[in-house]
Image (cartoon, rainbow, N blue to C red):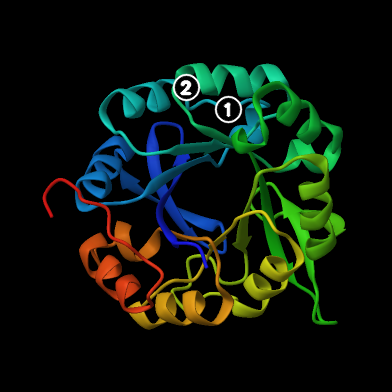
Amino acid sequence: MTNVRLIARLDIKGRNLIKGVRLEGLRVMGDPQVFAAKYYAQGADELIYMDTVASLYGRNNLTEIVRYTAENIFIPLTVGGGVRSVEDVSTLLRSGADKVAVNTGATQRPELVTEIANRFGSQCIVLGIEAKWRSDGSWEAFTDNGRERTGLDVVEWAKRGQELGAGEIFLTSVDQEGTAGGFDKALCGAVSAAVSIPVIISGGMGTIDHLIEVVEDCAPDAVAIAHVLHYDKLSFHEIQAAAVQTGRYTRRICQGA
């Protein structure tokens, strides 16, 4: 069983770090670079930047933030939002991103995933999936911060994404995101069992127990964390200590540890 990664998720609007509930009601938290530097110093394994308003502009607007981060923070960086072409990916990679997440662009034109994988390698392409629970017990994939329906079944879409060349799945439970009520373990387990590529689960962490439960019960390859970090409810040190107890985490030697 692989070593789980602990990832800080930073949702960006303009130049600000924001946080919402179920991807709505966004609240400005401050300068994302300050938060990113703090999480790096505390020992985050990776960072994920998501441009939450990219769909309004038709492109990702994080190149300057990414460039600054890449010059000062030396852990893997994934960037997503508004990616519609191979050229968009190239721009973000040149700015300093290690991986690029694609959601809307892939649902509209699935061959985009293959084009990116062929050009840069599967390790560079992350398929972002925003999942909402359906009354029949399945989940539907959404785009645009959980606002736009795609009609795609999440588990089937994840499997197809792997076939198209995605190297990783970034799976957000829209129902749980920002609620601090715990991860959607059924969702995490269903997608993790359906694909052989790494799955990052995001949405819902409010306590240490939530982390331990999802790691032990669902075996994701990574956990993305936002709410408890941004609101100083938990530090990465505390989260790491809990992850070590699961037997699936080796703590990164970090600054300020």
Q: Secondary structure at mark 2?
A: helix
Q: Residue at x 70, y 43 (%)?
A: 103
Q: Return the residue at label 2.
A: 63
Foreground residue, 102 or 29? 102
Q: Residue at x 21, y 51 (%)?
A: 253
Q: Label 1 to label 2, Cα distance in Å?
A: 8 Å
Left-right relation of 192 to 249: right
Q: Is residue 82 above or below residue 64?
A: below
Residue 182 visible in the picture: no
Q: Is residue 218 above or below residue 78?
A: below
Q: Residue at x 79, y 64 (%)?
A: 155
Choose top left, top right, bottom left or bottom right for residue 104.
Answer: top right
Q: Secondary structure at mark 1?
A: loop
Asked whether the residues under the numbered discs 1 and 2 touch, taking CB atoms below 8 Å apart as contact, a structural biologist would say yes
Left-right relation of 241 to 70: left
Q: Residue at x 55, y 42 (%)?
A: 52
Q: Return the residue at label 1.
A: 60
Q: Amino acid at mark 2?
A: Thr
| Residue 51 x/y as whole percent | 53, 37
Q: Which mark is residue 101?
A: none
Q: Quadrant of the C terminus?
A: bottom left
| Residue 20 x/y as whole percent | 47, 58
Left-right relation of 171 to 116: left
Residue 112 visible in the picture: yes
Q: Amino acid at mark 1?
A: Asn
Label 2 environment density (alpha carbons within 10 Å; few <14, some 14–19, many ≥20): some
| Residue 251 x/y as whole percent | 27, 59
| Residue 220 x/y as whole percent | 55, 66
